[in-house]
Amino acid sequence: MIGELYEHALAGQTRPEIEHADGSRKPLPVEGWLHESPGDKSLLDRCVGPTLDIGSGPGRLTVALAERGIRKITGLLLDLGVSSPQIDTPERGFSFRFDGPLDMRMDTTRGETAADFLARADERHIAEVIRDYGEERFAVSIAKALVAVRESGAPVRTTRELSAVVARTVKTR
């Protein structure tokens, strides 16, 4: 029906695959990983049909393909890494270079923001997350400082506030 179909996340390592598609491969854009940049929009013109929405996560891929009448994929190429636009956009809440809301969600339409997590989690859980996901050796000290700031009545809500707490706590930086 569509021929050889490759599903692509329009970013990073998959970009060359889309740019050099020779017609035997039909890239299928996936909304969950599409970034709003002019380069990505131009790549959409080389793709098959409208963007595939797998908003609830990769587990929805089979259902989403079936909804479009696609029963078979002969190849699947995913770039699931983090991209600079995700990190550098202040509104995403990852950047320490620019102040923005402390969000840090890959999908900003669901789940708890980092600020909300810090407002409710206990010290042990905060330290665990910082240590395990941030690979931070000063996780316990940082968690203790974040809880102290929260208990003082001024919870951390922005990337600049988080950065300031970390800088005060970890003197080596």
Image: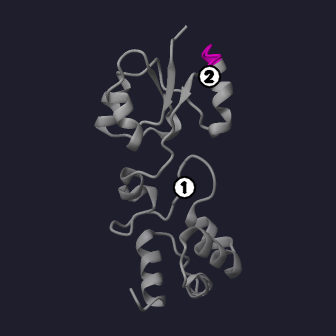
Which residue is depicted at the point 61% across and 85% down?
A: 140
- The answer to whether residue 11 of the structure is visible from this angle is no
Q: How is the image coloured?
A: one colour
The residue at 46%/63% (across/down) is 101
Dot 1: within a 10 Å radius of its alpha carbon, few (fewer than 14), some, or many (20 or more) residues? some
Instruction: Looking at this view, name the residue that lies furthest to the top.
Output: 1
> Where is residue 119 shown, x and y percent of the image?
63, 72
Element under label 1?
loop
Instruction: Work out whether mark 2 precedes mark 1 in sequence or the reverse, and give the earlier one.
Output: 2
Question: Could you say whether the residue bearing mark 2 is in a helix, strand or loop?
Answer: helix
> Against 163, is 82 above or below?
above
**Span colored in magenta:** 67-72
Identity of the residue drawn at 50% across and 25% down: 6
Looking at the rendered structure, the kind of residue marked 2 is Leu
Quarter of the figure that contains the N terminus = top right
- Quarter-wise, where is residue 153 in the image? bottom right
Q: Is residue 59 left or right of residue 50?
A: right
Residue 2, image x, y percentages: 51, 11
Quadrant the C terminus occupies: bottom left
Say what amino acid the circle numbered 1 marks.
Arg
Identify the residue under disc 1: 105
Indicate yes or no whether the magenta region holds residue 65: no
Where on the picture, by quarter, is residue 69?
top right
Q: Is residue 33 above or below residue 70?
A: below
Task: Name which residue lies at 37% across and 40% down.
Answer: 36
Residue that badge 2 annotates: 65
Instruction: Give me the C-alpha separation between circle 2 and circle 1.
Output: 25 Å
Q: Is residue 35 above or below residue 91?
A: above
Please give left or right for residue 147 compared with residue 93 in the image: right
What's the magenta bit mostly, secondary-structure-wise?
loop
